[in-house]
Structures are given as structure tokens and as C-alpha cells.
Amino acid sequence: MISSTGHAAHAGCPCCDPRLRIAADRIDLELSRRGFVAGVSASAASLGLFGPAGAHVAPRVSAPPIVFSNFQLFDGTSRTLRGGLHLLVEGNRVKHIATGEFAPPDGAQQIDCGGRTVMPGLIDAHWHAMFAVIPVSALFAADIGFVFLAAGAEAERTLVRGFTTVRDVGGPSFALKQAIDTGLVTGPRIYPSGAAITTTGGHMDMRPLSDLPRKPGGRLSYMEEIGGANIADSVDEVRLRVREQLLQGASQIKLVGGGGVASPRTTLDMWTFSEPEMRAGVEAAADRNTYAAVHAYPPAQIKRAIDAGVKCIEHGHLMDEATARLIADKGVWLSTQPFVSEDDVPPMTYDQSHRNLLKVIGGTDSVYTLAKKHKIKTAFGTDCLFSPAIAQRQGLMLTHLAHWYDNADILKMATSVNAELLALSGPRNPYPGKLGVIEEGAFADLLVIDGNPLQHIELMATPDKAFMLIMKDGKIYKNTLPAG
């Protein structure tokens, strides 16, 4: 029997239901970097799997208040712990921090922390949610649907490592962010940049040579189609590409100022954008009341970026004394990463990438020494890429900062200091509110640590054992505390 749709009717076989065929066709048609969530949602809605479109934010299920007691508090800004407190969470906010006797609200869930440390959730200021675990070879061979599914699984692992917020500085993470925010996927808050904006031959131009020559206005490369990077070779193209990311919901913009480690056809000393081109990107971001960050390593690239009005430098490992002084004088942020050995990155299979990597590792001590000397506003990030094993080192990377900073400054950098950088997004901030601190009115993102990280920063490297409880947005995602 043939149905009116032209498909064989199988009353007892749901997988052959014409509605499922239609849904599958819609997913095939609509599954793209902009339409991934929309396509799946529309297809599921056509089957009546959930409510009508238009409910963009999942309704918060009413949950009882939660009272934490018997803990030592690191609030994200202090250099010491405080005891004798009760902490009340209502909804997704810290409602009250009380000293002395405290009467919990009726029906409140009470959590005895057993004298352990409560601290804010960690923030990674340089993360690539879509590319953290997929090897480069697989990235270009895999279906985009697989890329999204792998990123969704890694998002949950990121959260249970204690990172409740990440700033994504290059990749098509808009749909993943939406899925997390609406409760479809478990993961951290994401501040998305969207595609990194680069030039022909710049870092993140990963096209095969068979795609050359590039024709202005011609077909986009695969990396551009999936939203990993965009190529712009003129002032007008830069504006266009930046505005496209802002249209999709970018909270800040990522511009590429030179070569990079992961791009085997670039060198760290090369330049990409001219100053007018870079300024066009900065101005396009400023027109939307947010900022641009620039990938740059050596002094000349950094200076050009600052001259163009950039507010944050990513990496900066090859800076010199004069450049550090310029960054400090201009009040520009430095978002850098503590690469101390080749263990901190996946194996480099290309000779040029390996040479670039060795230069970055060789500059790590200098960049932190200069940043500390000149009191540069410095954010912590990991830049973990292309390897599940490397992604698992996210907390271990934080402990590398002990080479230059004391434990209190390390914890502050990964919480309240990083939150200050996130706040540069201004009205484009997707999560307006206090992050990186535990104080009244702040988002209820917190960890319960089995030990004192102000004395033992190495606890950050073993979240599976040391992090007894993880809460994000007032919801508990892990709780291995002994039952009271």
C-alpha cells in the first residue's frame, strides 16, 4: 500500500512513519551552523515532541531554596577564607550570606559541606567549545552533525571539571549555547565570538590549496560554511564578517592579527590585517556596544592592534618590555595561556606548527613575568584544542600559574578577574549579572572543594576527586558530599 506521500505505509513500524521521513528530510535540509538547533526543533515540533516554537528559554522549574552550611568561603575576591556562614540560594541567585544563627526558609534543602571550601565556579577566558576534542583530521572529514554532538558531550565534561563559564573565541558555538541555555544540553555558560575573522593565508585559514584562488564574492570554504573562521581581505569585508557574527549573537568579536600554532602554513611573525582593516572590525563591534579581541604574539602585531583600538590581546607570548608597558598604559586586557611544555597541546604533525609551538612555550615565562611586573589586567584561559586528553587538563593548566602567582591570585584570576573581562561585552552580555564571585545577588555558580585551594592549588587539577559539588545557575549538577 502506498500512502499519499508516496512512501510505503507501515502501520507497525514507527521508523517508517512518513512523518519521520519528512522530519529527516527537514533535518537534512536545515542542518547547518545557523540552522542546527532550529532544524531539529522544527522537525521535533512537527511530530509533537514538544511545545510550539517561540518559547526560546526553557521555563525554570520551581525548586526549593538551598542552604549551605559548615563551610569555609572563598568569595572570588578575598585572599583568605571565611567561616561561620550560611549561604542561601534561591532560584539562580545567591540570595543571602548570613553569619551566626540562621533560620532556613520553609522547605529548604540543607547541605552540610563538612568544613570544606565553597568557591565560585571557574571561568575559562579562551576556550573553543566546538573544537576542543575533535582532531583536525576528523574535523574536516566529519559531518557537521557529529561535530555538534561531540561538542555537546564535551560541554558536559567541561562543566563537571568545574568550569561553569567559558568565553568561546572562535567557532560555531551559537547553537550549542542556545541548547545549553534552554536546557537541551548540559554545559557551561558560553560567551560566543562566532567565527574568528582572518585574512587569506592568516591563522585559521585552513583551506586546502585546491580551493585557491579565492574569488571575491565566490563560494565559501568548508571552514567558513561551518562558522569556524571567516576570511576577509578588505575593510568592507571585515565589517561584513563582523556584523554577521554580531547578527548571530556574538558577545564579542575575535580578529586574527597574525600567524598561529595550529595553522601549519603560517609563521608567528607574519601580519594579517592592515591597521584600517583591523580598525573597521573594532568599530563594527563598538557600533554594537561590545569589543574586539585580537590573536597576536609578537610586539608589532600587538602594537598594530592597540593602535586600531582593540581592548584585549589574546596570547601575546612574544611581547617585549615596551609592548608590555604599552598594554598597561592603554588599559588593554591580556588573555593568555600558561603553555609550559608540549604536554599542554596535542602532538604537532607539521614542522612549522612545531616550530611555532616551541616559540610560544619559550615565551610563556616572559609574558607572565612582564604582565605581573607592569600590572597588566590578565585573564586566564587554556586554548585546549583537538584532543580529549588535552581538554581534560583544563584544571591542570590553571595550576601552572603557580610558577608566577600565589594561590589567591590564581583563584581570583579564574573567577572574579575573568568575570571583569566578560563584562566588557556590555549590553551584548548574554548573562547580565555578577559572575565569578559569591555575594548576594550573584549568579549561583559555585563549587564545594574537598580541601583548601588557597593552600593547595593542585586540587584544581583533580576535579573528579576534589570537586564534591558543582552548581551552575542554582542547579546542582554533581553532589558527592556524604549524606547528612
Image (tube, rainbow, N blue to C red):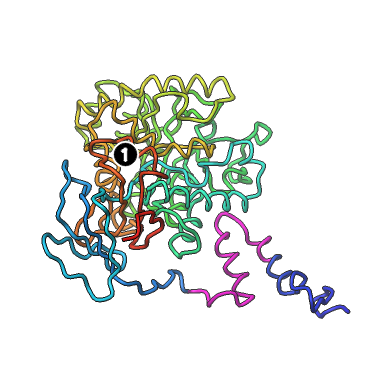
- State yes or no: residue 447 in magenta: no
Please provide the residue range marked out in magenta.
26-54
Could you tell me the amino acid type at mark 1? Cys
Looking at the picture, does residue 132 appear above or below residue 107? above
Image mark count: 1
- Is residue 231 or residue 453 the one in the foreground? 453
Looking at the picture, does residue 71 appear above or below residue 90? above
Q: Residue furthest right?
A: 1
Quadrant of residue 312 in the image?
top left
Quadrant of residue 257 in the image?
top left
Quarter of the N terminus within the rendering: bottom right
Residue at screen point 33% across, 56% down: 429
Quadrant of residue 484 in the image?
bottom left
- Is residue 406 or residue 432 the one in the foreground? 406
Residue at screen point 62% across, 53% down: 145
- Is residue 278 or residue 476 the one in the foreground? 476
Q: Position of residue 263 (x, y in %)?
A: 53, 30
**Apparent side of residue 3 relative to residue 153 in the rendered image (left or right):** right
Q: Secondary structure at mark 1?
A: strand
**Apparent side of residue 433 relative to residue 189 in the rendered image (left or right):** left
Q: Residue furthest left?
A: 100
Looking at the picture, does residue 78 appear above or below residue 354? below
Query: Crowding near pointer 1: few (<14 within 10 Å), some, many (20+)?
Result: many
Q: Position of residue 60 (x, y in %)?
A: 39, 71
Q: Position of residue 154 (x, y in %)?
A: 51, 48
Q: Residue at label 1? A: 312
- State yes or no: residue 37 in magenta: yes
Q: Position of residue 132 (x, y in %)?
A: 50, 41
